[in-house]
Structures are given as structure tokens and as C-alpha cells.
Image (cartoon, helix red, strand yellow):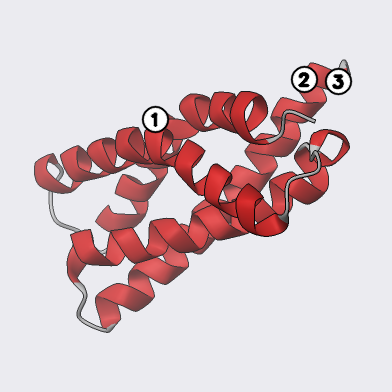
Amino acid sequence: MPERGAELLRFAAAGVAGLATDVLVLYLALALGLGPYGGRVVSFLAAVFVTWQLNRRFTFAARAGTLSLWRQWWRYLGAMLGGGAVNYGAYTLVMLLAPRHAWLPLAAVACGSLAGMAVNFIGAKFFVFTS
């Protein structure tokens, strides 16, 4: 598989781990009474941290550059905010328009994650992990 395709596949795999984190933290936040929107902010931040760790170690390890981890984290978080806005918008639409069900937050997070993936990949590849 060409390196570009392998990189995208590794990014998607990290995204699946981020999705699992997002959903688990969201349901925990809901159980603690944070609500579907405040809880989603917390779960998004947890997912960003998990994907940053995976992407810097596996997806873009050869291009991780010389930034300190602190600066790299803040750059990564900043880059993920664009995709995060797309993600949160799609999440909100699904939450508002779909029928209420116990699985609704899971479906909304999944739709949001897919919607923001391209923006996040571009941000990670060309803004954070530039070598």
C-alpha cells in the first residue's frame, strides 16, 4: 500500500480509538449530569488527547518534528478545532433531528466524527506534523 494510503488508514484507526473514547466519556458525562452538549465538550477533548497520542506515535511518527510535546499538543488541539466545529455541528443536528433513543448520542458522535475527519486529517498532516 502506498505510504499516503497507509497514513490515511492509520489516521482512521486512531480516529476509531478517538470515537470509542468520545462515546465512553460522553456516556460517563451524561451519567454525571453534564447533559448532551456540555458532556460532548468534555468527551471531545478526551478524544483529541487520545488521537494526538496515537497519531504522533504511529500515523505521523516519521514527521513528528522537533516541537516540544507541550507545543505539539496545543498545535494539535488548535488544528482539531476546525474539524471539531464540523463534528459538533453534525452531532448537534443529529441530536436535534433524530428520534430520542438510548443509542442517539452514539449515533450523533459517529456522524460528527465522520463529518470532521477530512478537516482533521488535513490539519494534522499539514499544520502539526510537518517534520
> Where 74 falls versus 35 (above or below)?
above
Secondary structure under the numbered disc 1 in the rendered image: helix
- Image quadrant where residue 55 sits: top right
Marks 2 and 1, how far apart at CA: 19 Å
Q: Residue at x 88, y 36 (%)?
A: 62
Residue hosting label 2: 5
Q: Residues within 10 Å of mark 2 (few under 14, many from 20)?
A: few
**Circle 2 SS class:** helix
User: In the rendered structure, which amino acid carries the disc numbered 3?
Assistant: Glu
Q: Could you classify mark 1 by the number of other residues whose Cα lies within 10 Å: few (under 14), some (14-19), or many (20 or more)?
A: many
Residue drawn at (58%, 29%) of the image = 121
Q: Kindly give the residue lying farthest to the bottom in the view shown.
A: 32
The disc, 1 or 3, on the residue closer to the chain's N-terminal end is 3
Query: Can you say which quadrant of the picture contains the N terminus?
Result: top right
* Residue that mark 1 sits on: 115
Q: Could you give the CA–CA distance between mark 1 and mark 3, rounded to whole angstroms? A: 24 Å
Q: Which mark is residue 3?
A: 3
Mark 1 is on which residue type?
Ala
User: Vertically, is 115 above or below 94?
Assistant: above
Q: CB under 8 Å between callouts 2 and 1?
A: no
